[in-house]
Amino acid sequence: MYIKRYIIASLVLMGLVGGYVYAYITKDAMGFEFFKIHLPELPIAIWVIAPMALLFLATILHMVVYSLVNTLKLRRYNKDYAKLLESITQAYLGKKERSNIFKTKRYELLGNILDNSMIIPVKNIRIDANDDKAKKLRDVIEAIETIKRGEVADLRPYELRYNNELVIQNDRNKYKKGELGEEDILSYSSRYDDKLCQEVYIEYVKKAPLASIERYKAYLTREALEIILMRVNAESFKLEISNEAILALFDKFDFTAKDYMDIALLLSGSSMIPEQRMKLFETLSDKNESAMDAYLFTLFDLEMISIAENILQNSQKDEYQNFKAYLALKECNKNYNINMFV
């Protein structure tokens, strides 16, 4: 109910009733005592509308109180609506630490769900530009769409951590667009996520000198190691590196026999000097028995038959059956590709 309209209607009604009594019923006045309180002598018309006036005042007070209560409730809903938008914004941003306190039960349930969820927009969402409370959410969605297109967005206003997925992708976009160099990322790696540093390091080792490769070897991956090995004595971006330095890189990994064999197969087509390759896998097999298959493959691939034969003769009967079969065929003048036996 509109209070102003109610007040006007009530005053008009009381005026009509009082006027009617005074004009058409009686113009007399009277006074009386109420709980030993002597009330002044007033026209009867006034006394007729007095209860109406008291009811009017009580009604107005009631309406004001409940209007104030509803205003406070509405304010809580408005605040919770803003917090809900903030919670959605944080879910879009993928923030890890979230704790929004809601005042209303309905929003509290939705807020708790959002604070423990991540939201990934599948398409561009249009938000009313006139909704000021949703401005931050609108800006975040636009930033996400910008990053998804491979462009660079300004994420500084959102205070995201360096390992946030959006930040990682945004930094990746900066790197691809040339706004960040490899040295910029690797030299200040504490500002960037390890995944990004590893990706950049893979590209970095394709051309970097040995000293720089070793400086940032904390981000060495198997893919990067293979690139380094293929650069040894290669025609382009040639890398001169000792076996001691290569072994230091191998120490970062806990390779299986298959891993060593995969690298041996890779180096079979490399430019690495045969003596260095053979010595590398000999040392690896001395340090780790899992590398013995890779060493035997390398010996046969390099036609170092006598060394391989000596190793096989001193092995257990059930060991290295594939290489023993290859050696037996070799002794029978049957020439097969060693790759068929690994």
Image (cartoon, rainbow, N blue to C red):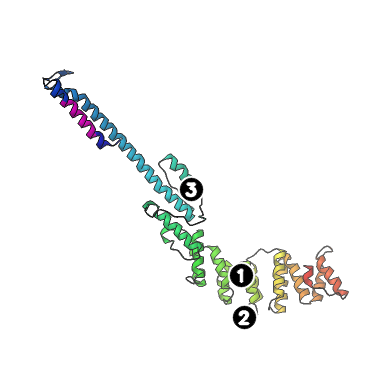
Question: In front of the other: label 2 or label 1?
Answer: 2
- State the residue lying farthest toward the bottom: 235
Dot 1 corresponds to which residue?
Answer: 224
Magenta part of the protein: which range? 7-19
- Front position in the image: 19 or 253: 19
Above or below 58: residue 70:
below
Residue 271 image offset from top left, x and y in percent: 68, 79
**Residue sitting at 51 percent across and 59 percent down?**
165
Which of the image's four quarters has the C terminus?
Answer: bottom right
Q: Callout 2: helix, strand or loop?
A: loop
- Check if residue 10 falls in the magenta segment: yes
Tell me where residue 226 sits by quadrant: bottom right
Residue matched to label 2: 236
Seen from this angle, which residue lies furthest front?
24
Local crowd size for mark 3, using a 10 Å CA cut-off: few (<14), some (14–19), many (≥20)? many
**What residue sits 70% from the left and 68% below the top?**
262
